[in-house]
């Protein structure tokens, strides 16, 4: 049996750590400890960023790591946030709530299946040029739990309007499987020149500082900023496509 180098284990260990936080989020959701559940999803998202960071920095990417990352993403960013949303807000909506969370989980599963297919075939032009096709599952999970964080800030509108939350969640689910180009932060800051590692680490530290000191406000600001970047990503994608066609 071929001996595995320790540096090859580091990204996978980080991925498994994120998986543990995803499982913990589900547990906290069933125990009505919703703030801890959201916090676990956020930590899982951090782990999802760091595993790719270390895989590229240590040059230890592998097929096992890619598949493990995908399975972890499905639980942490597909199942866990859907259960959290249902237990915290949508449970009283009954059928509407059940259909909404099941639909989101299905969209997440389809998203990851499509991503893995493109990863294997390597024919996804959006990915190669620094864009994702659709909204990634980690970003989608953050977006669908924003109404939950509003409740932490004292807003009760989400409980009073479950149909709006249902429509919002379905829209985010559709964005997961859409062909809308969105920025790939990992590719922009991790694959290019080494100087960009400094930019990535600086931004990462600023985001962490905001999430630690003002978690729910910072999370909503990040979510709004991400949504606002979508039109710019579409415009950037068309510009790069034109440049490629000219060459």
Image (cartoon, rainbow, N blue to C red):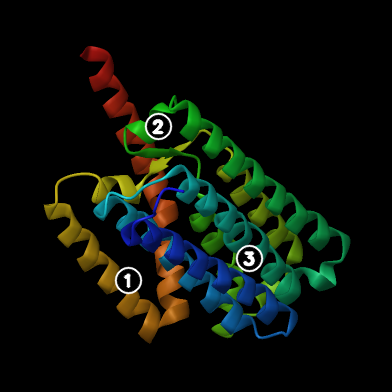
Q: Is residue 202 above or below residue 225?
A: below
Looking at the image, is mark 3 or mark 2 earlier in the sequence?
A: 3
Q: Is residue 197 left or right of residue 177?
A: left
Q: Is residue 92 left or right of residue 211?
A: right
Residue at the image point whose x is 75% and y is 66% from the top: 162
Q: Is residue 218 above or below residue 142?
A: below
Q: Position of residue 79 (x, y in %)?
A: 67, 60
> Is residue 246 in sight in this rendering?
yes
Residue at the image point whose x is 58% and y is 63% from the top: 76
Looking at the image, is mark 3 or mark 1 earlier in the sequence?
A: 3
Front in this rendered view, residue 55 or 89: 55
Question: SS class of the residue under badge 3?
Answer: helix
* Residue found at the very far left of the displayed protein: 195
Question: SS class of the residue under badge 1?
Answer: helix
Q: Position of residue 27 (x, y in %)?
A: 69, 78
Residue at the image point whose x is 55% and y is 32% from the top: 117
Residue 153: mark in rendering: none
**Quarter of the rendering containing residue 191:** top left
**Quarter of the rendering containing residue 222:** bottom left
Q: Is residue 85 left or right of residue 222?
A: right
- Residue bearing the label numbered 2: 126
- Residue bearing the label numbered 1: 207
Residue at the image point whose x is 11% and y is 54% from the top: 195
**Quarter of the rendering containing residue 123:** top left
> Is residue 160 in sight in this rendering?
no
* Residue found at the very far front of the displayed protein: 1
User: For the residues marked 3 and 1, what is the alpha-carbon distance in whole angstroms?
Assistant: 21 Å
Looking at the image, is mark 2 or mark 1 earlier in the sequence?
A: 2
Residue 81: mark in rendering: 3
Question: SS class of the residue under badge 2?
Answer: helix
User: For the residues marked 3 and 2, what is the alpha-carbon distance in whole angstroms?
Assistant: 26 Å
């Amino acid at each position: 049996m071929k001996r595995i180098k320790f540096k090859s284990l580091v990204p996978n260990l980080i991925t498994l750590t994120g998986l543990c936080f995803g499982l913990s989020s589900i547990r906290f959701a069933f125990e009505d400890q919703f703030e801890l559940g959201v916090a676990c999803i956020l930590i899982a998202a951090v782990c999802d960023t760091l595993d790719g960071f270390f895989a590229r920095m240590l040059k230890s990417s592998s097929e096992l790591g890619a598949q493990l990352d995908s399975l972890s993403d499905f639980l942490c960013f597909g199942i866990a946030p859907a259960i959290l949303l249902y237990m915290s807000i949508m449970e009283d909506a009954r059928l509407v709530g059940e259909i909404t969370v099941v639909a989101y989980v299905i969209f997440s599963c389809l998203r990851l299946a499509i991503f893995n297919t493109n990863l294997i075939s390597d024919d996804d032009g959006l990915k190669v040029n620094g864009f994702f096709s659709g909204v990634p599952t980690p970003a989608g999970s953050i977006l669908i739990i924003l109404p939950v964080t509003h409740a932490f800030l004292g807003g009760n509108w989400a409980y009073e309007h479950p149909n709006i939350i249902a429509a919002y969640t379905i829209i985010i689910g559709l964005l997961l499987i859409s062909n809308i180009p969105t920025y790939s932060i990992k590719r922009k800051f991790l694959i290019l020149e080494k100087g960009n590692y400094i930019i990535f680490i600086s931004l990462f530290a600023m985001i962490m500082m905001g999430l630690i000191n003002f978690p729910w406000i910072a999370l909503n600001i990040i979510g709004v900023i991400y949504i606002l970047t979508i039109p710019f990503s579409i415009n950037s994608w068309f510009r790069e496509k034109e440049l490629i066609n000219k060459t």
